[in-house]
Amino acid sequence: MKTNSQFQASIKPTTVTAGHKIVTTASFRGVAKNAFFDNMIVDPNGNVFAWNPDPDTWNLYKDTGTLQGEGRFESRWTWFVPPWAPLGEYRIFVRLYEDPNGTLLGRRSVHEEVLNIQVLESDDSKVHFLRRIYSDILEREPDIPGLADWYNAMQKLGLSKGTVIERGFIISPEFLIIQGYKILSGGARPNQENYDRWYSEILNGQRSLNSVFEEMLSMPDCRTTAEYTLKEFYGLIKSTFFEGRLKDSKIEDLLQQAKESEKTKGVILSEMFANPIFQKFQILLRLCKELDRAEFFRLLKRYQQGEISLDQILEDHKY
């Protein structure tokens, strides 16, 4: 607890696992005129972070409202730290404001204590799953808004892990743009400006994916691929999109179909990403990296034929 002659503030516990509760208290002894207590929570990245008042106890421990007169005043808040909250050290500013004129415009902070709390990783299995999927499929750490949205969809809508991947991550504009550019450029990632523009255009239905891929092929990073023959292009797809695991005979069939229908490279690649069979291929490439070629294709066949669900695959592979 931190103290001065009139104002006290405390927090319990000082270390909490995300997904659990904390309690902050504030008290003041003295003369108050239109005064009130307030909390501000700042996350490890310096952002003001909104925790939800705990729904089970908030009505019991709501603040005291406006403080008037002389005496001892106390307020207590019970907060719920979301399972997806950023990890690290938070600062909680507990303040006593005075508003002598009652206009709000004239309010000022007359007392402040800064409390520190350490938030540790959640023990919620859905959070662990989502963090791993962000890494394995999107190849990055999760952003907090995205992590929160997916967690809430699983928690409130009952989405299964398999559904989150099949109907979310593997067909997301982010995955399609990043992976498409990496294939066409030989491993590079698009610059942020182009990525943001393409993402917005696809998300808002302003452009098709194959149109974006065609624009990528006009860029310096992708110039070599743009000059490939269709046979060379399918060789590139085999080594990148399929990581060398697709049979040459299948590549020859796809090549022949492309020649007959006069498909452009952008259309070819966008159809690959849109094909449910190849989506399953992509999912297993990212989730079952430890399987050898024979094991991979046995599992892929069962998955494609509906003999095993993605949820069962995830359970078998400890996701």
Image: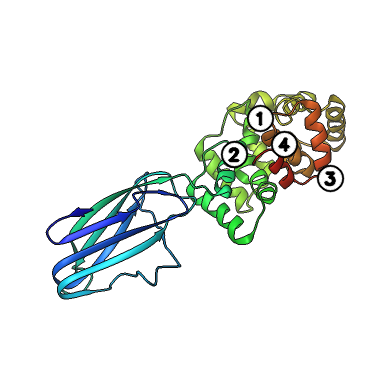
Q: Quadrant of the C terminus?
A: top right
Displayed quadrant of residue 255: top right
Q: Earlier in the sequence, mark 4 or mark 1?
A: 1
| Residue under numbered circle 1 | 184
Helix, strand or loop for disc 4: helix
- Residue 307 numbered mark, or none: 3
Q: Earlier in the sequence, mark 4 or mark 3?
A: 4
Residue 295 appears in the picture as rendered: yes
Q: Cα distance, mark 3 to mark 2?
A: 27 Å
Does dot 2 land on a helix, a strand or a loop? helix
**Which residue sits at x=87%, y=31%?**
253
Please name the residue that numbered disc 4 is placed on.
284
Is disc 3 placed on a helix, strand or loop? Answer: loop
Dot 3 amino acid type: Glu
* For marks 3 and 2 on the same chain, the one whose residue lies earlier in the sequence: 2
Which residue sits at x=50%, y=40%?
A: 193
Callout in the foreground (3, 2): 3
